[in-house]
Amino acid sequence: MWQQLLCVVVVSLSVAHGQCEEMVKGSVVGNIVQDLGLDLQRLKSGKARIYSADNMEYIELNKERGLLLIKEKIDREVLCAKTTPCALHLQMILEDPMELYTITAEITDVNDNAPSFKRDEMKFAISESAVVGAKFMLEKAYDPDVGINGLQSYFLTPTDYFALKLHSQADGSKNVEMVLQKNLDREKRESMSLLLTAFDGGEPQMSGTVQIHISVLDANDNAPVFTQKTYKATLTENAQKGSKIITVSASDADEGPYGKITYYISNIMEGLTDAFTIDEVSGDVTLNSELDYEMISNYQIDIEAKDQGGLSDSCRLVIDVLDINDNRPSISVISMSSSISEESEIDKVIAMINVNDPDSGENGKVDCAVMDNIPFVISSSSSRLNFFSLKTQQQLDREKKAEYNITIKCTDEGVPPLSSNISVQLHISDVNDNAPVFEKNCYEAYIVENNALGHSIFTVKASDSDWKQNARVSYILEDITVNGVSVSSYVSLNADSGVISALRSFDYEQLKDFHFRVKAQDGGSPPLSSNVTVKIIIQDQNDNAPQILYPVQTGGTVVAEMVPRSADVGYLVTKVVAVDVDSGQNAWLSYKLQKATDRALFEVGAQNGEIRTVRQVTDKDAVKHRLTVVVEDNGQPSRSATVIVNVAVADSFPEVISEFTNFNHDTTYSDNLTFYLIMALVVVSVLFIFSLIAIISVKICRWRQERQFYKSATNLPVIPYYPPVYADGTLQRVYNYEMCGTTDSRMSDLKFVRPYSQNTLLNVSRAGTMQSVKKEQEDDELSLEVSFFYDVLSL
Ligand SMILES: *[C@@H]1O[C@H](CO)[C@@H](O)[C@H](O)[C@H]1NC(C)=O
Ligand SMILES: *[C@@H]1O[C@H](CO)[C@@H](O)[C@H](O)[C@H]1NC(C)=O
Ligand SMILES: *[C@@H]1O[C@H](CO)[C@@H](O)[C@H](O)[C@H]1NC(C)=O
């Protein structure tokens, strides 16, 4: 900035004054000649020159014209800075005569400088909380010019928030302040830019500007605000620990720490401080414990949000817990009878049960049922809820089931339903309601005759389905008579074991069977009993040897059979007749020729005992023959009898007699030989007739028995035992007959009843007497039982 300076030189009488502005070089500052009243000659003669004490030669003297000229450009600001007025002091020296003139040149200012600020911009950080009227010192502008050319005024734009205020200082300078006119709000405007302009008063006016940057600092003027005053959430009771429930959210218009919100639970019900947690940054509320609807069904939680400036807001979180069917019914037996009698009536209450389900609503409604198909029911007692009574549904029977495990299952009505069960044990106590029962309707036991005394024949057994004493069976023999004798003399009965043993040795030939009744009685009170018929059948033993009826063996007499010499082959000489009082196999007889004088001539029929010739009799054959025949029964071991048969082979009695007198001196015997032969023939014929009668009577008796049977079905007749019919001829079994006849008709029915009569004692007399008919009356029918004994004549 190199400006022209104007110099004004002021020259006084002795002192020349000049004004010089900051002018260009050569510019006229003042006229010395004029101001000092000198003439140009004097200047020349006097060798006028300019003297400056500080050797600064800003101004030179033009002697020809008497003018002061700018020698060098003058800068007032350099020369005087702010000092006013600014003057240059010069001396003009003249010689011949020495004259000194003082020249003062006042340097006037030119507005050559604009106001300026040191910095290009100013920065302020002002809190939004700054109050209206707050002052902010601004940097002053600087203008080196002086006076009117110096700094005159400031101007600030825009002025909506700030106004300028100038303070005059003692030194005349002015302090510039910026005064807050209106509250700042960072949230509306966080920064602003102002322009401060400084003006001087020169002509033309000059100005300088500076940018003012204001950043509005945040103040915690906003509290956090929750988006809702009340939050609502529902949770199921079974919600997992750690599950997120809801997120609460608050906002804060502030920034930085004042806008940083932390959440926390400020208030919760007593003792539940740890039940929920909140994430202090995100506001997520999570479950931190197990829920139980039955304990707490609703939670009220106060949540606070706080910024770091300490401002806060609160909200309420309401959590409703939804019931889940998470509780099984709990069953408790209030009272229970552990045992009831099998006689108890239907609907008898056995137990009272209380069921409790803490769930609510349907989840807590419970119904109970008896499991399995057992005769019990459970029903809700009408008066009070949750009380049930267990009752019998049917008549109980200990004999069918003595113990019940009753399982009661209770189920609630939740979805899915929950159930629980209990088992109770019930014993059915016994009542003596069952009589002993024999294993069979009637018993038949067999014992072989000639048994040992005390031989146990048989065991009766009755069972009683009752219990203990009520089932303890004892056996009692009911006394009846068998053949006029008390049955208790035949058999004994063990009361505990039911073993029947023989008290005597039985003889089949005398007693073939008998029956009696056995009573079984239990130990109940009153006792129950039942009875059964026991029939004892005595079995035959081969204890009788066959007995030979014919030919009769006499001590002294010799019996001989006559065989004519003309007899053909197969001539029937005689027949050995034998009986055996045993029965069955024991009475099945067989005949054998044991010894013979001539074995080639005779044979014995093994079945029928017939002695026949085997070959033609010749003249050479001896007259006298002696045959030994053995009769053997079929028992084990077999028993036998022998008979000696004398046979005479002759054409005439004298021949026989003469022969036999040789070995038998009983002459009366031989005299009667012919008679005997005739008698033998008669006997054979009679045998045949009786056989016929026997067969017919058997048929008739059977027919009668059948008729009786159908007449009275209750009276079952004892079916007689019929041994097999043996081969013809042998009379070993059948020679006892019963004749049945009605008294009215006098017509006799012949009835064959038994192969042997118990009462028949067979006496075969050696003399062959004919026994009289023995009559016996039987039953009401007055049938006659006639026993025929037929006689065999001894020869
Ligand atoms: C009942 O249960 C008991 C054990 O609890 C068992 O010993 C008994 O045999 C059961 N009775 C029936 C009849 O199931
Ligand atoms: C009874 O409950 C037990 C467990 O307490 C369970 O194992 C059983 O299956 C249940 N019985 C019935 C019949 O529901
Ligand atoms: C034997 O039992 C029958 C029924 O089985 C009964 O009628 C009878 O009276 C009983 N007899 C005795 C002597 O108890």
Image (cartoon, rainbow, N blue to C red):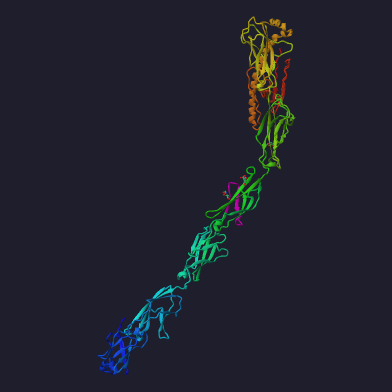
Quadrant of residue 105 in the image?
bottom left
Spot occupied by residue 630 in the image (x, y as percentages of width and height)? 67, 15
> With 292 as the anchor, is 193 left or right in this view?
left
Query: In this view of the protein, which residue sits in the foreground, 103 or 605?
Result: 103
Does 378 appear in magenta? yes
Q: Is residue 493 above or below residue 576?
A: below
Spot occupied by residue 197 in the image (x, y as percentages of width and height)? 36, 80
Question: Looking at the figure, which quarter contains the C terminus?
Answer: top right
Q: Residue at horizontal 53%, vertical 62%?
A: 276
Question: Looking at the figure, which quarter contains the N terminus?
Answer: bottom left
Spot occupied by residue 421 in the image (x, y as percentages of width and height)? 59, 51
Q: Is residue 649 above or below residue 119?
A: above
Q: Which residues are magenta?
A: 367-386
Q: Is residue 188 above or below residue 541?
A: below
Q: Is any atom of residue 51 visible in this view?
A: yes
Number of residue marks: 0
Q: Is any atom of residue 394 visible in this view?
A: no
Query: In this view of the protein, which residue sits in the foreground, 641 or 745?
Result: 641
Q: Is residue 566 above or below residue 760?
A: above
Does 688 appear in magenta? no
Spot occupied by residue 383 in the image (x, y as percentages of width and height)? 61, 57
Query: In this view of the protein, which residue sits in the foreground, 125 or 735?
Result: 125
